[in-house]
Image: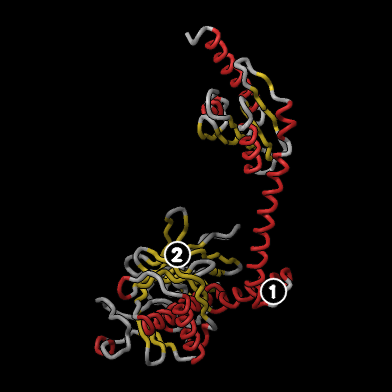
């Protein structure tokens, strides 16, 4: 099948055709028709979907692809109770028109953006990708640049929407070799038997096999979302038509809700949000300081409950209700300032626990090694270590190891270090 009806009229929504061939490939059934308005995936535009109707049965078309010979193949599912389609069957094809029209708006929007990028900044578009949510193009800029400033992107977007507002004619055709030389093409196409070009007004043209709108005004609006560097090029993400309109609706709903929550006019939402973040940061700082103060208030009680170990040092091992690591660290460090005290502290945090071990410089257990030997993931220095685990009972394991270490140290002291 080489008669692609969309070449003559991209607005055909339904057609009749004869099944010419059937093949099974990659677990799916593919049909070749005598003619088709379904667009096969190519040029960054996804393949069309829809259905083929035969009598009372409708066969969903889930993908459309072309082979190396230019034949178009339709992947069709066999509905329950329906006979398989065979060569010779006369079918009526119906496109998923909402999806096709969306792709036409995205593809035409890409051509408009490509013209604007080239016109304003001399950039050339190399590729298009129409995704389910958003579309993107890759652009080569003069001098190897891979980014544009916000104002430059806004200039591109503004010009694109001016082109849309002009409502210029869009023409798709196969010119002969002589005519191609006189067309306003941004870049000359390669060598092909037939070259299809898409022209906007009398100022923009490029070789393209995709489906397009009849006028620039039918693109509705173009919205640039963001840009990024990608493989030495500028990648531009955008929306056209109804996608852009829905995006605006979603953004406005979010802005309107934020305006109500912040009790600020719409265009003062960023300022109000910055003020709230600054205020929250100060409150967070004050809260951390308060929690640290509350943690340190436990110091006398913990010292009073310290366990005297065999080597004469004291051990403070406690599971505490602290909610933040800085408060736990501050308390452990304060305990370590007491002569001969080793602190093994644990703070349960839901289904996990924080651990902080600390002691003064001098003799004592290597706390980083002690934490590791107890099965707690973490690390640090011999005098200070922190970590985390899913089991608070590992504090008991650490306490047992600390007692054993103190006992061995006491034995060495009693035997004169032998």
Q: Quadrant of residue 302?
A: top right
The residue wearing badge 2 is: 31
Task: Residue at 34%, 76% (x, y): give it.
Answer: 124
- The mark found on residue 148 in the picture is none
Snapshot colouring: secondary structure
Residue 260 x %, y %: 73, 72
Residue lying at 50% horizontally and 82% vertically, measured from the top left: 11
**Residue drawn at point x = 25 percent, y = 86 percent:** 177
Residue closest to the eye, 81 or 210: 210
| Left or right, residue 61 beside residue 269 | left
Q: Nearer the viewer, residue 143 or 34?
A: 143
| Residue neighbourhood size for the residue with mark 2, other residues' Cα within 10 Å, grouped as few (<14), some (14–19), many (≥20) | many
Decide: is 281 above or below 344: below
Question: How much space separates mark 2 and mark 1, taking CA atoms?
Answer: 50 Å
Q: Quadrant of the N terminus?
A: bottom left
Q: Is residue 5 visible?
A: no
x, y (%) of residue 393?
A: 66, 27
Q: Nearer the viewer, residue 315 or 370?
A: 315
Q: Which residue is mark 1?
A: 256
Disc nearer the start of the sequence (2/1): 2
| 106 up-or-down from 376: above or below | below
* Residue plotted at (56% across, 18% down): 405
Is disc 1 placed on a helix, strand or loop? Answer: helix
Where in the figure is residue 292, as x and y percent of width and height? 68, 44
Q: Residue furthest front?
A: 339
Image height of 133 relative to 178, above or below: above
* Residue 219 screen position, x and y as percent: 51, 83
Would you say 119 lies left or right of 335 here?
A: left
């Amino acid at each position: 099948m080489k008669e692609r009806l969309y070449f003559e009229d991209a607005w055909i929504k339904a057609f009749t055709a004869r099944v010419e061939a059937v093949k099974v490939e990659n677990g799916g059934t593919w049909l070749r028709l005598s003619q088709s308005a379904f667009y096969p995936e190519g040029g960054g535009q996804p393949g069309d979907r829809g259905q083929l109707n035969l009598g009372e049965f409708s066969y969903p078309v889930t993908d459309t692809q072309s082979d190396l010979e230019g034949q178009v193949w339709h992947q069709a599912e066999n509905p329950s109770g329906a006979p398989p389609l065979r060569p010779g069957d006369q079918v009526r094809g119906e496109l998923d028109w909402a999806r096709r029209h969306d792709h036409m708006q995205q593809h035409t929007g890409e051509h408009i953006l490509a013209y604007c990028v080239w016109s304003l900044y001399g950039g050339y578009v190399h590729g298009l990708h129409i995704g389910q949510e958003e579309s993107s193009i890759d652009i080569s800029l003069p001098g190897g640049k891979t980014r544009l400033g916000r104002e430059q992107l806004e200039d591109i977007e503004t010009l694109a929407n001016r082109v849309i507002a002009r409502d210029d004619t869009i023409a798709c055709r196969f010119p002969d070799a002589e005519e191609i030389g006189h067309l306003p093409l941004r870049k000359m196409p390669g060598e092909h038997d037939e070259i299809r070009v898409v022209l906007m007004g009398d100022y923009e043209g490029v070789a393209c096999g995709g489906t397009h709108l009849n006028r620039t005004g039918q693109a509705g609006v173009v919205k640039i979302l963001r840009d990024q560097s990608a493989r030495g090029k500028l990648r531009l993400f955008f929306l056209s038509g109804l996608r852009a309109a829905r995006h605006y609706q979603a953004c406005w709903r979010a802005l309107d809700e934020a305006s109500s929550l912040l009790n600020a006019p719409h265009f003062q939402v960023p300022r109000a949000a910055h003020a709230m973040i600054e205020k929250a940061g100060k409150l967070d700082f004050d809260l951390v300081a308060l929690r640290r103060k509350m943690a340190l208030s436990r110091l006398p009680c913990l010292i009073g409950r310290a366990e005297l170990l065999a080597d004469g040092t004291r051990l403070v091992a406690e599971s505490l209700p602290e909610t933040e690591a800085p408060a736990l660290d501050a308390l452990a460090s304060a305990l370590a300032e007491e002569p001969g005290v080793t602190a093994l502290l644990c703070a349960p945090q839901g289904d996990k626990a924080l651990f902080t071990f600390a002691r003064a410089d001098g003799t004592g257990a290597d706390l980083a090694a002690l934490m590791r030997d107890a099965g707690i993931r973490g690390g640090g220095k011999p005098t200070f270590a922190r970590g985390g685990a899913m089991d608070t009972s590992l504090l008991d394991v650490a306490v047992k190891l600390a007692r054993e270490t103190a006992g061995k140290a006491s034995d060495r002291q009693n035997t004169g270090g032998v």
